[in-house]
Image (cartoon, rainbow, N blue to C red):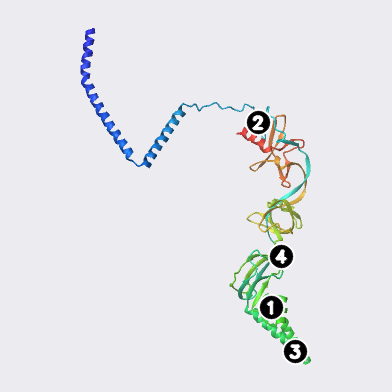
């Protein structure tokens, strides 16, 4: 048996010799070809410019570092254990939407979280009226051309302050020149007839003509000073100076120098910025609470700590079909000139008094359109619920529904504690 195995092994060895010979030849050829290609690569690399060889080495180094980082990352355990806060926090939600939060073992810092007892106070019941400011139209003036002419000069441009009698626009007008000549002629005639006692009838007619010429000049825009100056000098002026009839500012200028105007064309609009109107909108359900002559308090975001007084002087007879609101108009006291036209303001009208729990604005937590208050119901138990009310003066809030006297209200730190409610709710 042993001899047979030896013979079989010898035959297999004889059969494999040619195959091993061929394999050795192939290996030799492959090694020669690899060596040749390696030499070509080396020669090609060293034939490249220096900048290109530097870039190639940089890419090889970056690729090696990247592969090394990937290998290291595969062997590093990223599933480290995470430590969770083991403090027990429970949140219960009532049917009314109120939430109760328990914080066992948690002591709130008394310097940050301050509680006060709710106390009822007598507060004014007010009606809020949104609106805007506008120039008082009764105290505004439009400067218009009273005869055809040409604008020669503009003395006051938009926004310029003016006094009564200040020059605004200089206008060339043939009619004004004709009126001056008529006045001078009638004045000379009247002076000549005054020396003759026999022509008293003609003197009266001349004086009437002189007065009519003076009135014509006034109608064209001339002042009494212009008429006296004309009578004293006896020389006509080619241009008519249009003057301001009030103290205020030039709100809008409608013409430019050199413009041709006709009778009735608007030249400029003048108004007093201290004489303003408040135009507010009162909704249908509140119409019965508005009366002419009522005093309102205005507040503006520009002056949050200042109040302005307004008196209702007009109530529209009809409802605006687009807004379904009633327009009211008030005279505004703006002696300091702080308020400006087109500013948005909010008016408050006191319509009565009521009992409410007054808390600081810091006690109110606003979430979208809802307002919440947080109270302390136990040593480590807190309750958040919705309330209703209105702002008093920007610093205090009158709670009319939801808060009862004696409750421990969180007045400072409400926003911080509300974050805990929000986290537990999630």
Q: For marks 3 and 2, give the one nearer the viewer.
A: 3
Which residue is at the front of the view, 143 or 227? 227
* Circle 2 residues within 10 Å: few <14, some 14–19, many ≥20: few
Whichever of callouts 1 and 4 sits on the residue coming sooner in the sequence is 4
Q: CA distance from mark 3 to mark 2?
A: 108 Å
Dot 3: element: helix
Q: Which residue is mark 2?
A: 92
What residue does disc 1 label?
217
Q: Are marks 1 and 3 in contact (CB under 8 Å)?
A: no
Residue 349 in the image: state x and y as whole percent: 74, 52
Evaluate if marks 3 and 2 touch, with contact meaning CB atoms under 8 Å apart. Answer: no
Is disc 1 placed on a helix, strand or loop?
A: helix
**Cα distance between the residues tagged 2 and 4:** 63 Å
Cα distance between the residues tagged 4 and 3: 45 Å
Helix, strand or loop status at disc 4? helix
Q: From what the image shows, is residue 424 above or below residue 215? A: above
Task: State the CA–CA distance, disc 1 to disc 3.
Answer: 23 Å
Q: Residue at x 21, y 18 (%)?
A: 15
Secondary structure found at label 2? strand
Relative to 14, is 397 on the left or the right?
A: right
- Is residue 125 placed above or below 80 in the rendered structure? below
Sequence-wise first label, 4 or 3: 4
Query: Counting other residues with Cα less than 10 Å from the Cα at mark 3, is it few (<14), some (14-19), or many (20 or more)?
Result: some
State the residue lying farthest toward the bottom: 198
User: In this orientation, which residue lies closer to the viewer: 197 or 164?
Assistant: 164
Residue 193: which disc? 3
Question: Which of the two discs, 2 and 1, labels the residue nearer the N terminus?
Answer: 2
């Amino acid at each position: 048996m042993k001899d047979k195995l030896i013979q079989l092994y010898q035959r297999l060895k004889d059969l494999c010799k040619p195959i091993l010979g061929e394999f050795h030849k192939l290996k030799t050829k492959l090694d020669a070809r690899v060596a040749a290609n390696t030499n070509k690569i080396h020669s090609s690399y060293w034939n490249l410019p220096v900048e290109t060889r530097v870039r190639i080495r940089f890419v090889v180094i970056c690729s090696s570092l990247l592969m090394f980082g990937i290998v290291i990352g595969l062997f590093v355990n990223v599933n480290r254990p995470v430590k969770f806060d083991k403090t027990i926090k429970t949140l219960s939600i009532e049917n009314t939407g109120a939430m109760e939060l328990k914080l066992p073992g948690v002591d709130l810092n008394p310097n940050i979280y301050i509680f006060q007892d709710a106390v009822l106070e007598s507060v004014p019941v007010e009606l809020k009226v949104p609106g805007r400011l506008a120039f008082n139209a009764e105290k505004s003036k439009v400067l218009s051309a009273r005869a055809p002419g040409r604008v020669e000069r503009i003395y006051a441009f938009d926004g310029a302050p003016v006094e009564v009698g200040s020059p605004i626009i200089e206008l060339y007008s043939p009619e004004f020149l004709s009126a001056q000549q008529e006045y001078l002629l009638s004045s000379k005639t009247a002076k000549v007839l005054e020396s003759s006692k026999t022509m008293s009838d003609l003197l009266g007619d001349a004086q009437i003509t002189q007065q009519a010429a003076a009135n014509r000049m006034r109608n064209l825009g001339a002042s009494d000073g212009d008429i006296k100056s004309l009578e004293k000098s006896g020389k006509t002026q080619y241009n008519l100076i249009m003057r301001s009839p009030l103290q205020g500012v030039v709100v809008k200028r409608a013409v430019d120098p050199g413009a041709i105007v006709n009778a009735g064309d608007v030249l400029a609009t003048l108004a007093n910025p201290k004489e303003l109107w408040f135009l507010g909108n009162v909704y249908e359900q509140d119409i019965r609470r508005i009366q002419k002559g009522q005093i309102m308090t205005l507040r503006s975001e520009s002056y949050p700590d200042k109040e302005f007084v307004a008196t209702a002087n007009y109530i529209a007879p009809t409802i605006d079909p687009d807004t379904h609101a009633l327009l009211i108009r008030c005279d505004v006291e703006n002696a300091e000139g702080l308020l400006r036209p087109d500013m948005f303001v909010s008016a408050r009208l006191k319509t009565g008094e009521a009992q409410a729990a007054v808390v600081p604005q810091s006690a109110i937590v606003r979430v979208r359109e809802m307002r919440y208050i947080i109270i302390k119901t136990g040593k480590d138990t807190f309750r958040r619920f919705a309330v209703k009310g209105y702002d008093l003066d920007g610093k205090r809030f009158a709670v009319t529904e939801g808060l009862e006297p004696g409750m421990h209200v969180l007045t400072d730190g409400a926003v911080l504690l509300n974050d805990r409610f929000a986290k537990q709710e999630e």
